[in-house]
Amino acid sequence: MSEPKQNSYSKHIFLCSGRFCDPGRQATKLYSRLPKLLGEMGDYDNPERIKRGLSPCLGVCTNGPLLVVYPEGTWYHDVDEPLLERIVNEHLRDGNPVEEAIFHNL
């Protein structure tokens, strides 16, 4: 059996869909918007791609939906569609984190 292959990527973002963090069940809706928002940044063959994931728990359990950007470990709270667009455009595309929505950095 051969080993799996991982294409290169630059960042990995996760949205928390846990019932305590996201009681309004918005994380799944936000997650489904990411491919369009990311565009070419999310393309599988892009060596600088941004991977995305949906997690049932990120261990904070409040003020969600939460979104974390790795590898830098920037954590955002109360993410809604306008904030998600800002995170993609300002942080992921332009390299300027959305400071007023960050509650933790590694």
Image (cartoon, rainbow, N blue to C red):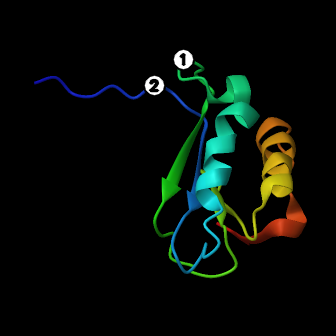
Q: Secondary structure at mark 2?
A: loop
Q: Residue furthest top?
A: 45
Query: In the rendering, which numbered label is found on residue 45?
Result: 1
User: Which residue is located at x 50 percent, y 27 percent?
Assistant: 8
Q: Give the mark count.
A: 2
Camera-nearest residue between 68 and 85:
85
Give residue 7's mark: 2
Is residue 84 placed above or below 92 in the rendered structure?
A: below
Q: Residue at x 48, y 60 (%)?
A: 55
Residue 101 place in picture, x, y as percent: 83, 67
Q: Residue at (79%, 68%) from the top-left corner?
A: 102
Callout 1 amino acid: Asp
Quarter where residue 35 is shown: top right
Q: Quadrant of residue 50?
A: top right
Residue 84 sits above or below residue 60 on the image: above
Residue 37's place in the image compared with 59, above or below, is above
Residue 87 drawn at (x, y percent): 80, 50
The residue closer to the viewer here, 72 or 76, is: 76
Circle 1 residues within 10 Å: few <14, some 14–19, many ≥20:
few
Whether the residues at callouts 2 and 1 have beta carbons within 8 Å, the answer is yes
